[in-house]
Amino acid sequence: MTPEQFIEFARVLPEPLLLVSGEGQLLATNQPVADMLGLRRQELSGRMLFELVTESTNDIVKYLQACSSSRAMVIGSLTLRKNDGQTLICRSQGAVIQPWSPESSALILLRLENRVVASNNFLLLNEKIDELAKEVQRRKQAEEALREANQELEIRVEERTTALQETLNELQLTQTQLIQSEKMSSLGQMVAGIAHEINNPVSFIYGNLHHAHKYTQDLLRLVQIYQQVSPNPPPEIQEQIEEIDLDFLIEDITKLFQSMKVGTERIQEIVKSLRNFSRLDEAELKQVNIHEGIDSTLMILEHRLQARHEYPEIKVIKQYSQLPNVTCYPGQLNQVFMNILANAIDALEASANNGQWPAVNSQTTDNQNLTKNNPQIQIKTEVIDENWIAVSIADNGLGINEAVRSKLFDPFFTTKVVGKGTGLGLYISYQAIVEKHNGQLSCFSVPGKGAEFVIKIPVISGS
């Protein structure tokens, strides 16, 4: 680079720049250097660097030699003599432009910087760096806070979603239970109404059967007296006797009245069972006979126990012990009996479809009387102690595997086809026994060997 090229290059730069030879002669400068010294640029041309600084000639020579022999920028310090007699300490950065050789002297570019300004700039830079570091730290903290806030929000949203889902499930369950309770209440009212309507005419018929039978016997005795008094009746009477077969009529009419009596008594038993079962809408604790509740439920389900063309008869084996009257909610217990017995019948019908009647495992259900050949339900009651009784209902159907058994009492769980089961029967039964009566409801089963449900309740609810 020639001095002229340097001048063209340095003219536009705001930094103080000097172009010197390896011997220290000023070859060119720019206006900022002249301003620092308080001189005109033309006054600096051709002068020696030694004349402008307070450092010794030896120190300057060593510094210029270091600049000439280094490929990197060499940092130094120069104290300039200003035109007004004052001094100015500058930071110097020297770099060789044209390396020294025997043919030509080295050309060295010196960049000067007021040390005070440089220090201030350095301090300012440090402040800016500190501010930037603080800003970076603040942003990192803000990002971390935002990340934590997002995580907390996600957790809250998830917790809220879970809570809402649980609330929704509870509402759906409550709604279904209310519908089911309303259905059962309506059923209880309907059954009670039917029982009442049937009971009146049946009671009338049953009450008059005795009198009708007595009147008939009186008339028959009168006929016998006529036969004794007039053993040879006129032809037209004899013809009527033969036509109505009087001897058979006398013999059969007694059987007829007896069968009508049995029929009306059967209807009365059904009405009694309907009235017992219609306790479904009762909400108060009452002392009841547990066996009556079971028998009334069996009466309601009797049509499903009878033989049909696709299913054989289901035999019910009762092993009743002498139970005390139990203080309980009778309607709820009847519903429990209904749900468990209906499920047992479903299981036996499924067994019939599979053509199997495996015996119940005696170790599990203790039902030695159940056989392979016939579908059976065994109902057993017993007194556990002075405070507790137990009712077990066992079938000899296909049984229940562990995966299903563990979920039997969960709401809406069912293995039945759509439209046949709601999955609430055993759940409601569990709630009724455990929560309403402070009792226990358990299921024991081995696949292929039937199932047994055991109900344990206190003699007085809450004890």
Image (cartoon, rainbow, N blue to C red):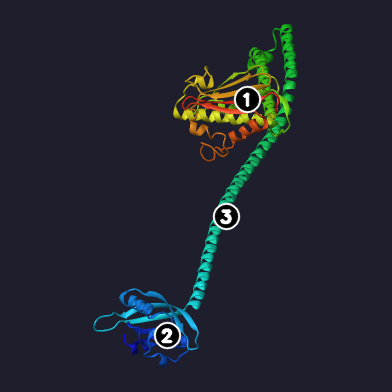
Is the C terminus in the top left, top right, bottom left or bottom right quadrant? top right
Secondary structure of the residue carrying tag 3 is helix
Q: Residues within 10 Å of mark 1 (few under 14, many from 20)?
A: many
Mark 3 residue type: Leu
Select label 2 or label 1 by which is in front. Answer: 2
Q: Position of residue 456 (x, y in %)?
A: 63, 25
Q: Which mark is residue 329?
A: none
Q: Position of residue 64 (x, y in %)?
A: 35, 79
* First in residue order: circle 3 vs circle 1: 3
Instruction: Using the image, determine if residue 73 lies above or below residue 27.
Output: above
Mark 2 residue type: Leu
Secondary structure of the residue carrying tag 2 is helix
* First in residue order: circle 3 vs circle 2: 2
Q: Quadrant of residue 274?
A: top right
Q: Residues within 10 Å of mark 2 (few under 14, many from 20)?
A: some
Residue 145 as seen in the image, left or right of residue 290: left
Q: Which residue is mark 3?
A: 153
Q: Which residue is mark 2?
A: 52
Q: Residues within 10 Å of mark 3 (few under 14, many from 20)?
A: few
Q: Position of residue 409 (x, y in %)?
A: 57, 34
Q: Which mark is residue 456?
A: 1
Q: Quadrant of residue 273?
A: top right
Circle count: 3
Select label 3 or label 1 by which is in front. Answer: 3
Mark 1 residue type: Lys
Please state which of residues 347 and 413 is positioned toward the viewer in this rendering: 413
Q: CA distance from mark 3 to mark 1?
A: 47 Å
Q: CA distance from mark 2 to mark 1?
A: 115 Å
Residue 191 as seen in the image, left or right of residue 413: right
Q: Position of residue 168 (x, y in %)?
A: 61, 47
What residue is drawn where x is 34% and y is 88%? 3
Please state which of residues 341 and 429 is positioned toward the viewer in this rendering: 429
